[in-house]
Amino acid sequence: MTSQKKTNGNLEDNAPEGTALSPDEQVEARKEGAKEAAKEAGKDTYKFLTDGNLPGDPPAKQYFGADDIMQFEGLLGLGIESFEETVSEKAEDPVPEEKVVGLLRLERNGQNRTSYVKAMMKRLGLKTKEDLYAVSPGGPDYTNDTTPITKL
């Protein structure tokens, strides 16, 4: 059985030549390491607890009344061209934004048709999947393509 060489707490004896630190340098290095660790822990805590908002702040975009959409539910039965015209901001009597959010949630959790989802995303100014999931967290990761194969 071989015996291991015991090392003492003196780093000068254990470190290769030229890399030994003086006691003052060791103390300073420990302080810097502790500061960096505290900074990283603070960044992680802020990121995971606040999602970019300060604690207690309301979300950046709220849609009050988005769940009260029964009178607008029939719009999802329109053809895509009519639907796009109806939810467009340029419509004569546009559907309120919070109701479009409610329709988007209903569509995403129901038929989930690509063209309808895209029309509502355009109206709401949503560009990415992350934006879509922030407004409408339900529904699968995909949408159902309803593009006609032929002109019939």
Image: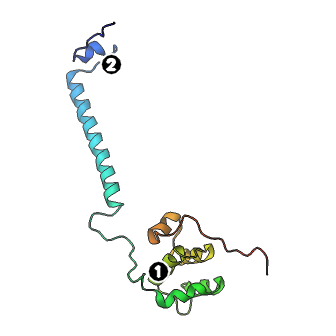
Q: Name the one closer to the observer, 5 or 127.
A: 5
- The residue pinned by badge 1 equals 102
Q: Earlier in the sequence, mark 2 or mark 1?
A: 2
In this picture, is 62 found above or below 22?
Answer: below
Label 2–label 1 contact, CB within 8 A: no
Residue 95 is situated, as x and y percent measured from the top left of the image, at: 50, 87
Q: Which residue is found at the position 51% from the left and 71% from the top?
A: 126
Residue 90 visible (yes or no): no
Frontmost residue, 25 versus 118:
118
Decide if residue 76 is in sight here.
Answer: yes
Q: Is residue 147 left or right of residue 119?
A: right
Which element type, helix, strand or loop, lies under badge 2? Answer: loop
Residue at 39% in and 73% down: 61
Q: Amino acid at mark 2?
A: Thr
Instruction: Name which residue lies at 26% across and 12% down.
Output: 6
Judging from the image, what secondary structure is the residue with disc 1 in?
A: helix
- The amino acid beneath tag 1 is Gly
Image quadrant occupied by the N terminus: top left
The image quadrant of residue 30 is top left
Residue 83: horizontal and vertical position, in percent? 60, 85
User: Residue 107 appears at what percent x and percent y?
Assistant: 54, 77
Residue 87: give x, y in percent of width and height: 55, 84
**Nearer to the camera, 82 or 38:** 82
Q: Is residue 85 placed above or below 115 in the rendered structure?
A: below
Instruction: Indicate which disc residue 79 carries.
Output: none
Q: CA distance from mark 2 to mark 1?
A: 64 Å
Q: What label does residue 19 carry, if any? A: 2
